[in-house]
Image: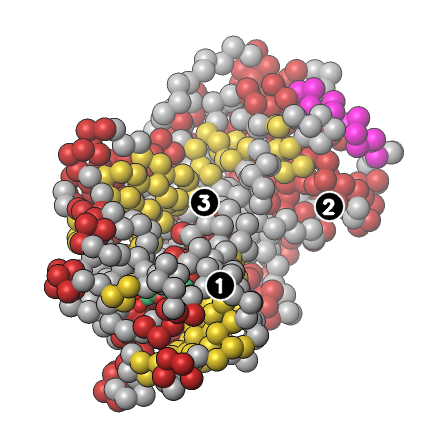
Amino acid sequence: MSSERRKILPLDKSVVNLIAAGEIIIAPSNALKELLENSIDAQSTQIEVMVKDGGVKLLQITDNGKGINKEDMPILCERFTTSKLVQFDDLKSIATYGFRGEALASISHIARVSVITKTNEDSCAWKASYKGGEIIGGETDGIKPVAGKNGTILVVEDLFYNVPSRLRALRSHNEEYSKIVEVVSKYSIHIENVGFNCQRQGGGGYDVNVRQAASRKDRIRSVYGSSIANNLIDLDIEIDDETRENYGLVSCKGLISNTSFENKKTIQPIFFINNRLVVCDPLRRAVTSVYGTYLPKGHRPFIYMSLTIKPENVDVNVHPTKKEVRFLNEEEIIELIVDKINDILKNLDSSRIFMTQQILTNTKRIEDDIESRRNKRMKINDYEKKTETPKLKPISQIKKLYEHEMVRSDYSQTTLNQFIKAPNNTVKEQKPMTLLSIKTLREEIESHLDDSITKLFSQHTYVGIADYKKRLLCLQYDVNLYLVDYGSLCYELFYQIGLADFSNFGVIEIANENDEGLSIKKLIKDEIYGNEEVINLFKKNLKTLPDLDTAVKTAFVDMKEMWEEYFNIKIDASDEGNPKLTSLPLFIEGYTPSWNKLSLFLFRVITKVNWEDEQECLGGILRQLALFYVPDMIYDNDNEDENNSNEEAKVKLRNVIENIVMPVVKSRFIGTDALRGDVIEIATLPKLYKVFERC
Ligand code: ADP
Ligand code: MG
């Protein structure tokens, strides 16, 4: 046996003594973590995990790493044999995961372990099986040549076969398996340039499957889904020399969720310290609590963070499975991280970031036009019949019987200027409005002010949504109940906000999978030009469809500066023939438009906006934007799957209307005569009380 080929050496006894208690494998996922770390240490680029019965029956890891020399195989599972550490000093500068040569030994005492391995230099693979730390069949007969690729297959079978108490203490196979998936998932996020997959033997496909070339964001997307991946911000804390020297913190990087990330589930933060998956409760608590001030109540962040700390400052032996870590200057380091995250989140306050959902095309859902608003008003009349209330009058005709009881306030004083201090623009400096056209449009609203409607909205008590398809909500005002077409209400509200906040909007950033925005042409082409039903609807009013290339150039590429300056609609026209939309205006903090209508909005811009006249152009764009931001109608469906997603959409909308839209309506909305047909009294409480008294 050539000694230079021998890489795994027994550790010196003195080193052994310096190392705290041995690893204890308490669950299959602990064993898996060790095996995974070994494969990563072996410089693999592809690691595949196969599991049976929650890892109890089988845990198999296949990697394409360096492999193990045949000469090292006899002592592979001996305690304190490692190829990674020779002296105690090495402990201080250890760069690899394992360094105690204990994992395989421990596992081989409580399971049947076998290895098939091949190094680059070997012409065939070698196979050996172990029991109680020793090779079965002895050093010479126990190692058999087999066919195999470069790398190592480590097979662990019948875990805890000789430790029945531990076996009994395990959770169900499913639970143990999900712990394994969790470990693989987390490493697959952290370790770039390595492909990972994990599956159950004989089960339906991969539960983790991350491509070798995937970016970190894509890794997160693959494991946790798009809603997380689309809401991430980079964390990269600059560490000055002083911090490095005094606290031993070398780097802190990661990806953390932004303030628009809507999530009520707890996702345990993922911490890697010196490339090792760890648990660090003080850090977890501190980092999660920063989000408390920025997220709505009950919402939780996603946190992935990788710290490098001088190895001599890290104590990994606190916990037998090496998961819980302690490090020197913990408080100072945590404070530094928390401050930085706080800064980042604070600066996000005026801009909301999220990505597009899949854009659905459905003619039913996009016939959101002025005509259909009229139709809806007719539908409200249908609704009136059903509700059997004897007299239904638009609010404007209602005699204000109880007015003497109400607190008086002078609504003629309400002007659009009150909008200018929009809460979503607290950070940005307000630009003064110098455009006469916008001033004129604002005055136009004020000239249509309707006192009674304004009063109703500013003093209402919100009751709830009455109809998702007809977009009706119910309000109480004084002793009356009203049905309000919230489609129309939002349309007017967003138009007003558009005028009031003109050129001072917050921003909604858009990014697709490749972080490059959405192709305007593609959206119009795929969803409008390519959709016969939609086109037929439009052909009724339009003689010919405009040439897409020219229209997009005129309306978007040539007007790029205007879009950005006035509307915060950023267009990336670096490829002139294919401009991309990268942001939209934020009208109300926390409110995002439905992507279903984006293509329709773009199409309306190229067909309905008059580019010849400033006032008509800007007003037209604001009208189209308002229409785009109106919430979708939600249809009930026969299809059960779709119904479930409808239920989800309803819950979401309910929350948005009640907590985001209506408070703004209450504080800022100016009722105009345009809404007269959209507000209908359905009952007065005294009459209702009489009905109940009779019962
Ligand atoms: P440690 O990782 O602490 O060194 P282990 O018991 O986990 O101890 O592994 C013992 C040795 O076996 C490692 O040092 C390494 O040389 C070798 N080894 C284990 N798994 C692999 C693998 N997948 N590829 C290459 N070598 C491996
Ligand atoms: Mg190891």
As measured in the structure, the alpha-carbon distance from the residue carrying label 3 to the one carrying label 1 is 42 Å
| Three-letter code for the amino acid on which mark 1 is drawn | Thr
Residue 312 screen position, x and y as percent: 18, 47
Q: Is residue 457 visible?
A: no
Q: Which residue is mark 1?
A: 119
Which residues are drawn in magenta? 545-559
Secondary structure at numbered mark 2: helix
Relative to 266, residue 31 above or below: below
Secondary structure at numbered mark 3: loop
Q: Are marks 2 and 1 in contact (CB under 8 Å)?
A: no
Mark 1 nearby-residue class (10 Å; few <14, some 14–19, many ≥20): many
Left or right of 11 in this view: 149: right
Left or right of 477 in this view: 145: right
Q: Which residue is mark 2?
A: 527
Mark 3 nearby-residue class (10 Å; few <14, some 14–19, many ≥20): many
Q: Residue at x 22, y 43 (%)?
A: 310
Indicate the quadrant containing the N terminus: top left, top right, bottom left or bottom right.
Answer: bottom left
Q: Is residue 124 visible?
A: yes
Q: Work out which residue is located at the far right of the displayed protein and give it.
A: 543
Residue 462 screen position, x and y as percent: 40, 49
Q: Are marks 3 and 1 in contact (CB under 8 Å)?
A: no
Relative to 615, residue 649 above or below: below
Q: Which mark is residue 231?
A: 3
Name the foreground residue: 225 vs 93: 93
Ligand 1: image quarter: bottom left
* N-terminal label among 3 and 1: 1
Residue 293 screen position, x and y as percent: 27, 42
Callout in the foreground (3, 1): 1
